[in-house]
Amino acid sequence: MRIGCALMLLAVMGLAGCKDRDASQSYVKDGKILIGEYASLTGGTADFGKSSHEGLMLAVKEINAAGGVKLGGGRMPIHIITEDDKSDQTEAINAVQKLISRDKVVAIIGEVASSRSMAGAQVCQKEKIPMLSPASTNPDVTKTGDYIFRICFTDAFQGPVLATFAQKQEWKRVAVITDIAQDYSKGLSGAFKQKFYADGGEIVAEENYKTDDPDFRAQLLKLKAANPDAVFLPGYYTEVGLILKQAREMDFDVPFFGGDGWDSSATLALPENIIKDCYFANHYSADDQREHVQAFVKKYEAEYNRTPDAMAILGYDAGRVMADAIERAGKVDPKAICNALTDTDNFPGASGFITMDKDRNAHKPLVIVAVENGKSVTKDTIEP
Amino acid sequence: MDQLSDQLIIGLSVGATYALIALGYTMVYGVLKLINFAHGEVYMVGAVCGYYLSTWMNEAGAPLWVSLLVTFAGAMILCAMLGFTIEFCCYRPLRKSPRLVALITAIGVSLLLQNVFLIGNVFGPTPRTYPIAITQSLSGYLDILGLGVSVLLMAVMTFVVYCTRTGMALRAVSFRVDTASLMGINSNRIITYTFMFGSALAAVAGVLDGIRYKVYPLMGLLFGIKAFVAAVLGGIGSIPGALLGGLLIGLIETFIKSQEYIPTQYADAVVFVILILILLIKPTGLLGKVAPEKV
């Protein structure tokens, strides 16, 4: 009798589970297109998530103000469901899982950090929901599958550009310090070193650290002892700030340079004596005078009362590219949107023209910036 | 060899903060035979309180020395109160229970504190730094300050424990709690003082590290455990042992990061290997004694 009850209970639970899985796949709720976003709104890289989220919401606000995305004669507004992954890879996977299975989104925008994008991409590719990363630069992100896209350049471009920049600055002997807990840092470091060696440069010292480490002085001492012309630091801004501070405190005054992971209001706010003689590559700089960039800067400043950083403009473009793809797809269906994204050609983004190449990456110009008076100042622009 | 002396200074300054926390662990173990796992979180609360106080002072435009005084003193007072509360609410009711129960409670308190501070309204998971005015002004002196404070406090504590009546009461309580109260010692008060003092020390370490690095709710996790290893290494229950253990762990960590053969990322792992080794080889620690005379 008791075994019978138990079996019945299991059967009911099993059926209930089945019901959940093939529930309506409409991707539309209350007449709005459901799009998911996963970002690091809190945690060690909170500035990335906050900026990209604000950029995305600005784009969506604009699109919805006009009625929404043009679909079959009428317009349908977009509804973004945002999940905070707390700058953690496991949380990113959970966030994407939740967006797909519980919220039934038709597409996902995210993430900025390459490690988390790769984690989320695995889920999106398996569930066949298109994912558009606004700012992840590690080439492996889009290699996950044909449902994964990005609207920014990759480290296969960024690394060599930084190596060439180093050569141009006549830094022949360079030290490198990498965050081995982040795929972004490892990838960019590798890409840089490869090109730097090929151009006849010399890597005089190499050190590692992990994300969340507070003290880097032991590693910095070793780098200093090797007497480099400059130090390559392809990390994220929280550690970058601490490393620069500790380096300057020990009179290690050579130039430090890095990639777009430095981009954050925290980096711009670093005191002059710490951030002088430092450079980093970025997707955009607020002092870019091109009309489409300044138009975005003004809109963003009016909405959020601060100058946008690169993640903000990329979040904005990601939203607009997604909306454009849905329009071209003509229906709210993941496969159709995926095909439309693959065909994105010369989309006029605020950060530049966006075309998806055969690897689903965009080819955009890169700017090398320095920080002066708390603002980002373009030192060089390199076209793809 | 210039590099060696620099590495030595770094090791000692990192070790000094470990020593401050280890002192708290060791003193509480001495009186209660309890490993207070929540101690690492008291360090974190100290850093957070210091952050809020220094930001408030900064916004009020107070002069630097007032800012520093309020930040340090305020953090110490608030953490002492926290220490008192933890002891009164979580450990005192369990005084007659098996030691395992109090230990698990300590872990529970640790998790509680971490998660309370992870709540956005209390602090949130995003790391923050102290106001630039404070970090810039102290920047060259923090190492010496940390080391000096640790050594000074250790000397003061050793003096108190061995040369004053309160110290004698402390040693009596650490020998046998109920017998001590039979001798007319207010055991509860001694235990409370121990907790409060240990927590104030952790607050100082927290503020120093908050100024040097950054503040976030999980900062006490790894740090607290490494300070615990330091306390065990030096001999849990021994005050000079806490200082020795702390400095040793700091030096070993820095040494690992500064040489070529073992990769940097193994520095933390090596610290835990040391814990296992010391427990296997000499469980009472370097300066600990099996005899009842502790603290």
Image (cartoon, rainbow, N blue to C red):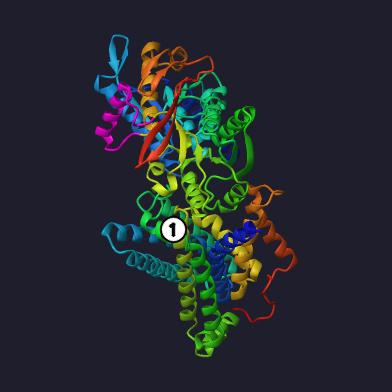
**Foreground of the two, B91 or A311:** A311
| The C terminus of chain B sits in image quarter | bottom right
Note whether residue A95 is visible: no
User: Residue B256 location, x and y as percent?
Assistant: 66, 54
Please give the chain letter of the residue carrying mark 1.
Answer: B
Name the side, left or right, on which B141 lies relative to A62.
Answer: right
Point out the stretch of residues depicted in magenta: A285-308
Question: Residue A23 or B152: which is nearer the viewer?
Answer: B152
Where residue B20 sits: x, y (%)?
53, 68
Q: Residue under circle 1?
A: B211
Q: Is residue A298 on the magenta stretch? A: yes
| Residue at 59% in and 73% down | B33
Q: Amino acid at mark 1?
A: Ile
Residue ranking furthest to the bottom: B183
x and y percentages locating residue B230 in the rendered image: 61, 65
Near-viewer residue (B193 or B43): B43
In which quadrant will I find the N terminus of chain B?
bottom right
Secondary element under disc 1, as helix, strand or loop, is helix
**Residue A50: in magenta span:** no
Residue visible at 44% across and 48% down in the picture: A274
Asked whether the viewer can see residue A376, the reply is: yes
Left/right placement of residue B179 relative to residue B77 reads: right
Residue found at the very far right of the displayed protein: B281
